[in-house]
Amino acid sequence: MTLYLQNARYIDSETLEVSSTNLAVEEGAGGSVTSIAAVPPAAERKEGDQVIDCRDRFVTRSFGCGHHHIYSALCRGMPAPPHVPTNFLEVLEYVWWRVDKRLDRDMVEASALGAALQMARRGVTFCIDHHASPLHVEGSLETVAAAFERCGIGHLMCHESSDRNGPEAAEKSLAEHDSYLASGRPGLIGLHASFTVGDELLKKSVALAEKYDTGLHIHVAEDKADEEHCVKTYGKRVAQRLNDCGGLASSKTILGHCVHCDDTERKLIADSSVWVVSNVESNQNNNVGLTDYDWLSNIMLGTDGMHNDMLRSAKAHHLVCSTTGGIGYDEVYRRFRNIHTYLAQFEAIGDGLNNLVILDYDTPTELSGDNFYGHFLFGLEALHVNTVIARGRVIVEDGRSTLVDEEEILSFAREQGQRLWTKLGE
């Protein structure tokens, strides 16, 4: 099947050149996007071919999220914690660790469906998720993956392994990774953070990543407490600990945050081939501090479970890092698009050029390759996303999913959200 985008104003996501053209979009994980002089007449098109008139609309590559926690999707508006947290460790103890231990299969599925639907409607067609459900482990990654696929979202999954819930829970998490990756699914080996991961679990996780030629996905120095624990317990800082056990060896490894890394750690990370994900809104929300990332080339952007809107994440990253690091608009955009470079390491993962957004961008000023960055940071919003194409297939049209019953998903999510809230009150 070929999807034809007629009368498009195509923004090349790499060169930023804006051209008036027609596009032929092939379906599939590696489908191409070709500029053509004209859309073939109906008599010459194949059965199943589709034509979308993009007159007065812009078309460009869709977006990706480098670090998410979709299990937080049911937490919007949830009851307040039993105690008001006064630091990051209390945020984890009184909020997120209370939530994740109450998740069951239905809640996990509802979270994944709700987050995937909202991502799709915001032009996000790929998500790297860091999932946590320590008392519902077996099959949880497949549940999330299937829910994402129902909504048309590509994915790279992991489960959050940790020693905080005891050795049995840690072993189950490792087994879930092993089972999921053995099935042929692409994924990473997830770890919570150094301060809840002992040496044995860390070694086993690195070995499992090597077994499947993949990387780790771990929070690093999000708060000072992570570094303080590592120095006190192991006599070294977090990045050094990871490096010493082989945790920085893979270019597929993702380090979340890296807010409190010192200069020695920064050099270790920068000299390796690993990737760092910035989540500045989450850092502000948790009051853990802010940092620059100017010491690093391999950096991409995430949401850390705060929301599902990557355009919003890019704007927040600009507002923070233009102050902490003094970066330009071009560097913000590079970091926004770097997820595609990272994902190119995974064969046929489905993040190709045939993932597109059609934007109803009612700009009062002209948009060109010369001034695109200004439009990107100060004009484009998720509300401008009209149609979304994933792997050459339309998954959102006129702002509505073409694949799922939105009301059914939202009703299911509200039902499971209420179940979660009730459990939190017990």
Image (tube, rainbow, N blue to C red):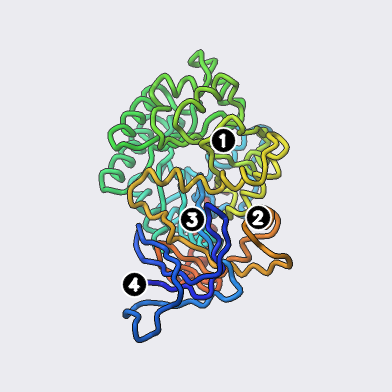
Q: Which numbered tag is attached to residue 111?
A: 3
Q: In this rendering, is residue 347 above or below 148?
A: above
Identify the residue under disc 1.
257
Identify the residue under disc 4.
1
Q: Residues within 10 Å of mark 2 (few under 14, many from 20)?
A: few
The amino acid marked with disc number 1 is His
CA–CA distance in space, label 4 to label 2: 35 Å
* Helix, strand or loop status at disc 1: strand
Q: Residues within 10 Å of mark 4 (few under 14, many from 20)?
A: some
CA–CA distance in space, label 2 to label 3: 40 Å
Identify the residue under disc 2.
370
The amino acid marked with disc number 4 is Met
CA–CA distance in space, label 2 to label 1: 32 Å
What residue is rendered at 66% in x and 62% in y? Answer: 367
Q: In this view, does 296 lie to the left or right of 138?
A: right
Tally of numbered tags:
4
* Helix, strand or loop status at disc 3: helix
